[in-house]
Image (cartoon, grey):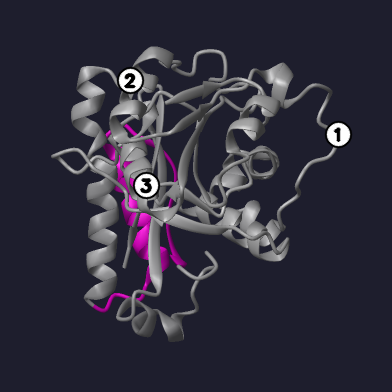
Amino acid sequence: MHILHTISELRAHLASFKHPAFVPTMGNLHDGHLALVRQAKPLGDVVVVSIFVNRLQFLPHEDFDTYPRTWEADCEALEAAGCDMVFAPSEKELYPEPQGFTIQPPSEIANILEGHFRPGFFVGVCTVVMKLFACVGPRVALFGKKDYQQLMVIQRMVRQFALPIEVIGGTTLRAADGLALSSRNNYLKPADRLEAVQLSIALTAMAQALRGGNTDITSLEQEAMAGLGARGWQPDYLAVRRSVDLQVPVEAEIARLANSNGLVVLGAARIGSTRLIDNLDV
């Protein structure tokens, strides 16, 4: 496995390959990331994983400085998973000058849900992903479906810019109790870790209600928020959306969409000091 820290090194090592498969990460890897690497293996002639904690997608009060960095463990895990190249640029390498040019995703998909509670988040995500795409030149790129909105934003960006990249979503991996794997799970105190599964339980109950014919999504969302709140959570949202565009479904289409995999339930909530996100297809 080659470990590369500059764009010129990366491009030199990629020169003899035609179909790179790419998995962008911020490091602190878990089994969900490694599953993406294994999924990527048969999809290209070389597998590239980037490790870069992107300052642009953190708000001033968020955890950029304390975000876990586990370099040695990440490299060992990537090599075991079959990664061919790790691209780990410094900030100075990837942003040699202030990044005046940014990608501004459309507000109807970027300023809702995560974008509402983390203003500018998707500008930072799209900008760094576009820059990494320019460095790697992948033919396929894999992102976890746990970050459902992020996956949709990136797929739309690639489509609208006519990039020759297939963006594939990897299935969310879960712990035995149902908690979605996430790098931020490492922040959870023992008691909060036991409680953390309640987010997926709340989303599962919403999905089951929708499949059972409940079309009152306002009540479903309010009850789910109140339920988590009563357990000591601070929920940002638990929402029912159309899976095709993340817009709020109208009542007349809810039953049809619930029976045709056309809905998704998404949630973000804080337990203790840790903010978790999750989603389930309906």
Q: Which residue is drawn at 65% across and 65% down?
A: 159
Compare residues 38 and 124 and report the one nearer the observer.
Answer: 38
Above or below, 119 against 29 in this view is: below
Q: Which residue is drawn at 26% across and 79% down?
A: 213
Q: Is residue 49 left or right of residue 13?
A: left
In the rendered image, which quarter contains the N terminus? Answer: top left
Q: Residues within 10 Å of mark 3 (few under 14, many from 20)?
A: some
Q: Residue at x 37, y 41 (%)?
A: 37
Compare residues 201 and 43 and report the one nearer the observer.
Answer: 43
How far apart marks 3 and 1 lie (CA) works out to: 35 Å
Residue 124 shows in this picture: no
Identify the amino acid type marked 3.
Answer: Lys
Q: Can you identify the residue that label 3 sits on?
A: 41
User: Residue 234, labelled with which disc?
Assistant: none
Residue 163 shows in this picture: yes
Figure quadrant of residue 36: top left
Identify the amino acid type marked 2.
Answer: Glu
**Front label number (2 vs 1):** 2
In the rendered image, which quarter contains the C terminus? Answer: bottom left
How far apart marks 2 and 1 lie (CA) works out to: 36 Å
Task: Report the span colored magenta.
Answer: 213-242
Which mark is first along the chain, 1 or 3?
A: 3
Q: Which SS class for mark 3?
A: helix
User: Residue 76, labelled with which disc?
Assistant: 2
Q: Which SS class for mark 2?
A: helix
Which mark is first along the chain, 2 or 3?
A: 3
Instruction: Determine contact: label 3, label 1, CB under 8 Å.
Output: no
Figure quadrant of residue 109: bottom right
